[in-house]
Structures are given as structure tokens and as C-alpha cells.
Amino acid sequence: MQEHLYNLNIERAVLSTIIFDPKEYEEIAAQLKPEDFYHPFHQHLFAAMEELFRADMPIDEEFLREKLSAKKRFDEVAFLDILGANPLSNTHAYIKEIKAKAQKRALVGLATEIKKLTIEEDMPAEDVMDRVESKLYAITSESSTQDFRESEEMALSTVEYIKKMKERGNSMLIGVDTGFKDLNRMTSGFGEGDLVIVAARPSMGKTAFTLNMALKALEKGDGVAFFSLEMPAEQLVLRLLSAKTSIALQDLRVGNLTDEEWTRLSEAVDWLSAQKLFVDDEGSLNIHQVRAKLRKLKAHHPEIKVAMIDYLQLMSGGGNKDRHQEVSEISRGLKLLARELQIPIVALSQLNRSLESRADKRPMLSDLRESGAIEQDADIILFVYRDDVYRIREEKEKEMKARAEGKEYRSTFHEKEEEDAEIIIGKQRNGPTGIIELKFQKRFTRFVDAGHVPVEIVYEQSNIDTPAETKIELPPI
């Protein structure tokens, strides 16, 4: 059985190739890790090669011998066996074989762990399945649960990160592009492993805001996973197409389009069809299902750069706990999943109704429903706020009150096609808090930068309720 789990001759041949031609190391190291080798000395030798490479030192017999001897990990017999192996002209098939056998060994270990968890520790079935899915994802995606990281490795890794940032010049964007200039400036983009909460009261536009970010990611060629627990995928796509084409959402819903708009729509549909957008609109999901689906999707589509969930309060924790415990399990689970998959996860959240009794209705952290767990786990918390939503509501209430009293009420407030909007950064673990000013274009469910360059569009009376001469400023597509 053991012969199916390792092949020492293949391991020796690959290591011998690196010693005789060190230029091969970088390509091989991009595909193998020390723990992919079965023989302990082979693991130590490959790790020593990595240390020499990082220090820009020769990867040769003398330096390897010195490096391993200093750590008391040198094995003369095993080293001579490697030096006696014939170097390879083409390592691809051999690397693939080493990797396959390492995965088999990992699966054998996982099988043993499943038995231990299920029988000896008697864990609940759901917890066992979640642990197995996590480990299986790690195996299939060629990652693994790592031990403590040593200071030397971390220091060198940090220097590499600093060099990478220097190569970017003056660009402040180091994470996923949010699609908004000032938000990028304040956050530097959403980082790998970040849990981002987008919260608002109903009708503020939190879904539209998140879809606008998704659209920007798609335009940059990134893959997007979207869990829609509130509306079917077709409604999400309608909103995306409206924002993309500058065709009013209501007109798209009823097909009331001019020939020129049909052309724009056709081009946008062709473009969207070619993007890596994946939507799950099952509607009823618990944290275990989200984890399983996203792990599987990411394993098959590594180009996924961000995942979005609309919205958190519609998820269940998957157990018989009270709601606060469930939300705590969900938020913690999403944070751990973001770190595991190394992508930002953007989760939408509702706010408590109590804020509407305040004079200043701008949200704050305490307005989050079940705020304790969410506030603790989130790296970034964004609130979407549009004052006009409340002003319109107040005017309607005044009008209804006047009618009930038999009076006439003439409002001086007029709804605008483009409203002022605020994105309030309520929390940012690694950056400042503050307010970002945007514009919200209601007809296209689209947020744009406050300083966007306008183009003038005149709409026909037949399409909207505003007069024919009304002019609306929109950003170029």
C-alpha cells in the first residue's frame, strides 16, 4: 500500500535536478512545498533551498550541506542518494506525481481524522462535515493547514510585500477595487480575508451599492460570487444591466426601449455573458451551506476575487440556538471563510428600526442588528445613507395628515433624479473612519463618485414622469 503513497526515486530526481541546475528551482517551487515530499530529509533539503533562494545565495552542494548541518538536519547517506540520481530534462510529470502522492497521503490522514472525530470524539454530524469540507478544500486547492510561522520567514515575506507595494508606485489600491475613488483612497480596497459589512435601513440602496461594486470587479476581469437570499438572479442581472447601459430599470423591466437602447442592451448582455459572475439565489441558506458552496466554487474557479451575500439576517446558523448565537456563528464563520479562501466577503446587513426615532438618522455601529458579533468580526463596516429617503417620507406623511384634516398641502421639496448619498465608514480595522460622498442615480440604481464627469441626456416625456426638458447628468459608460 505504501508504494502508492510515495516514490523516493522521483523525489530524488527532482531534488537532484535543482542542485545540478539551480535555475530550475523557482519553477519547481511554484508547484511544490516541502511537505509534498515524503522523506523527512527531502522536506528539510527543499526548505533549505527556499531559504538560500530568498537570501540570494547559491543553491549548491556546499551551501546546502552547511545550511542543514547548522540545523542538525543533515543526512549524508540520503544526500549522496540524491546526488547520485540523474537530473531531469523535463520535471513536469515528476512534479505532478509528487503532488498526487502528497494529496493521497493527505486523504489517508483525513480519513483517519474523520473516524476519530465521528467515533472517538462524537462530534455532531454537521460539525464533522464542515471540518471535512474545509480540509478537503485545502487538499484540492493545494493548500494546507500550516503550523506556527517562524520570524525569519515572516520577516522575509514582509519585505517581499513591501517591495511589491513599491513596484505599484503611488497607487493606494492594494485590495479589490470598490469602484469608488474616495472609498478606495480611504480603504486601499478590500483586502484578502476581509469581512466587509454593508449596512442600511430598507430602501437606502445597499443592494444597489454592492452590485455597483460587483460590476466594477467584473469590468476589471475579476470573478464574483453573489449569494442572493432576497431576490432571484434575474432581478439582480436587470439591475446590473441598468447600471451598465444607463437604461432606466423600469424601462428594462417592461421592455420599453428604443432601437438604440436595444443595441446597447444587446452589447451589455454579450459582455456580461462572458464574465465570471456566479449567483446562488436559492433563498434559504445556512452558514454551512454557504461555506460548502463557496469552497467548491473557488476550487473550480480560482479567478473568484470577491464574494457577496445579500443579506446576513436572512441566513441561519444551522443549529437550534437563539438568534444572537446564530448571528455570532454566521459572522465568525464568514470571517474565517474569507481568510481561508483569501478573498474579501461582503455581507449586507439590516439596521435596527430604533435609529428612525432620532433627529439625526445617520447610522452608527450600535444600530446594527445583533451588533456585538458583527461589529467584532467585521474588518470594515460601511453604512449607506441617503437623507432624501427620509425627506420624501416626511413630505408624504405631511401630505396625508393634511388630507385627513381636510387641508391642502403644497410641498416645496422635489424628488431629484440624482440624490446625494453618503457611505459612512463606521469601522475599519486597518484604516480611518469617515464619510464618502457619492451620488445616487435612482433610475439606474447606480451610485457614482460625487465628482463624476457628467454627460447630458434628455429624456422623452413618454418614458418618465418628469417634463421633457428635464436634463440629467450621468457618467460615461
Image (cartoon, grey):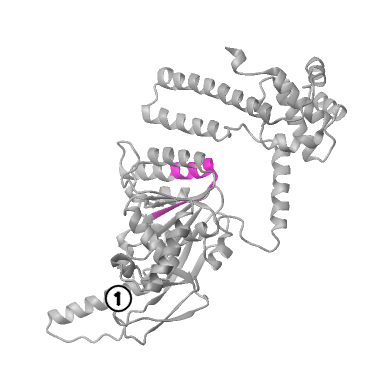
Measured as percent of width and height from the top left, residue 469 is found at: 36, 87
Image quarter in which the N terminus is found: top right
Of residues 36 and 404, the one nearer the viewer is: 36
In the picture, measured across the screen, residue 167 lies left or right of residue 195, that is right
In the picture, measured across the screen, residue 57 lies left or right of residue 174, that is right
Of residues 291 and 410, the one nearer the viewer is: 291
Q: Image quarter for residue 202?
A: bottom left
Q: Is residue 386 visible?
A: no
Query: Which residue matches tag 1?
Result: 392
Q: Residue furthest right?
A: 62
Of residues 272 and 22, the one nearer the viewer is: 272
Mark 1: secondary structure: helix
Q: Which residues are magenta?
A: 332-348
Measured as percent of width and height from the top left, residue 255 is found at: 31, 67
Q: Is residue 53 magenta?
A: no
Measured as percent of width and height from the top left, residue 451 is found at: 52, 76
Residue drawn at (66%, 18%) of the image: 7
